[in-house]
Image (cartoon, rainbow, N blue to C red):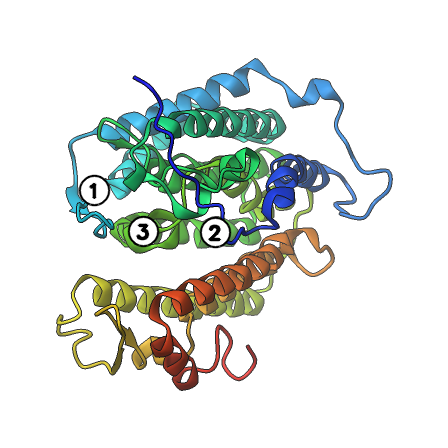
Amino acid sequence: MKPNKHKATRSAEKEFGGALGATCIPVFLPLTVLYLLSVCRSPAASVLQWPPPLPPPAQLWDPLATVLVVGWITLQSFLYLLPIGKVSEGLRWIHGSRLKYAINGFHALSITAVLLLVCLWLGMPLGYLFEVILPLAVCAIGVSYLLSMYLYIRSFWAPQHALSLGGNTGNPLYDFFMGRELNPRIGDFDLKYFCELRPGLIGWVVINLGMLMKEVELRGSPSLAMQLVNGFQLLYVTDALWNEEAVLTTMDIVHDGFGFMLAFGDLAWVPFTYGLQAMFLVVHPQSLSTLGAAGIILLNGIGYYIFRKSNSQKNQFRRDPTHKSVAHLETIATATGKRLLVSGWWGFVRHPNYLGDLLMALAWSLPCGMSHILPYFYVIYFTILLIHREARDEKHCRAKYGLAWDTYCRRVPYRILPYIY
């Protein structure tokens, strides 16, 4: 079978710094992951210390890490294929069809939790994950590169309607980074959808548990700060998998191709940088007062409430605008036939879910104290990410909805933070 010679969309505006960004990011982001992990394990934990705490090459490789990463992805693939849970349809493609997705992520998380309890009961040293965290990250980065190369090569056999507009520019480096194919599948196994919520997201909380168990080994019991970090982030992951169907309407699934950007983000960036707080606490324990812990719990609760309520409202409106929970909301008509919400959570700011996300991100970092900037890497990075994503959303919506979007922006002037931004 010969590859299809699709006409590239060379006129499409490039994102992430264009070809230069697509060349540099796949080099510097993996190095950033390894650097952050190394700094987190160092006594000073300073991102500006010189010389930097670079590990010797021997500490970057461990055959056990390869076994763990491959075994983990295999386990999650098996759980993904189990005939449990419901099957849901994604949004309609341009050519009219809809892909079907197995909604069983929460089942996968639950089965994984049972397996972890069995491991603990058998006395397996989950705290050893702290010792092999660098080799695990190296292996995850390697898998990301291999998967991205496979995705790029196979995209030349994909039909035209299956390609992403943003990743089909004709520039190999840029298209490798952005992803040429929108929803690559092997049979019914959707590679992008699987990576979006399974190995990396569930792996994140497993690594957190490993850090908690390492603290138990070192100090006899987990600190309150460690319990809060584990609890908050477990809630976040559980919520994502309980509401798994909502991801079918996100930009990652609907708009972005599956290339290095998403593959690396899902498999390496999320599990090894989102949980830096737990790793930091292993080496740099913190004490929390009852009042301080209560304030942090309240902040996380407020963030979670805004995040969940706004996302649920948006997803319900996208699925069924006539549903009783959203039918009363005020909307603006657009030339596409769709309507834009201008009341409820989405009349408060344009991205209330981002506001909730940022409040939770801050709550995850506060248990680590204020003496180091490293535990706040996530909230700093996430702020930049969400502002960038908001700008992408803005550009996409203005092109799609035209004058209706201008009207919406006048009705809802604040993007993320009321009266500020």
For disc 3, the neighbor class at 10 Å (few under 14, some 14 to 19, many from 20) is some
- Disc 1 marks which residue? 99
Check disc 3 and report the residue beneath it. Answer: 247
Quadrant (top left, top right, bottom left, bottom right) of the N terminus: top left
- Residue 17 appears left or right of 301: right
The three-letter code of the residue at mark 3 reads Val
Q: In the drawing, what numbered circle is on residue 38?
A: none
First reached walking from the N terminus: tag 3 or tag 2:
2
- Comparing labels 3 and 1, the label whose residue is closer to the camera: 1
Q: Is residue 405 visible?
A: yes
Please, which residue is most extreme toward the right here? 50
Cα gap from disc 3 to disc 1, whole angstroms: 13 Å
Q: Position of residue 179 (x, y in %)?
A: 45, 38
For the residue labelled by badge 3, is the local secondary structure a helix, a strand or a loop?
A: helix
Between 313 and 72, the residue placed more toward the observer is 313
Residue that carries the numbered disc 2 in the rendered image: 12
Disc nearer the start of the sequence (2/1): 2
Kindly give the residue lying farthest to the top in the view shown: 63
Q: Is residue 195 above or below residue 48?
A: above
Q: Residues within 10 Å of mark 1 (few under 14, many from 20)?
A: some
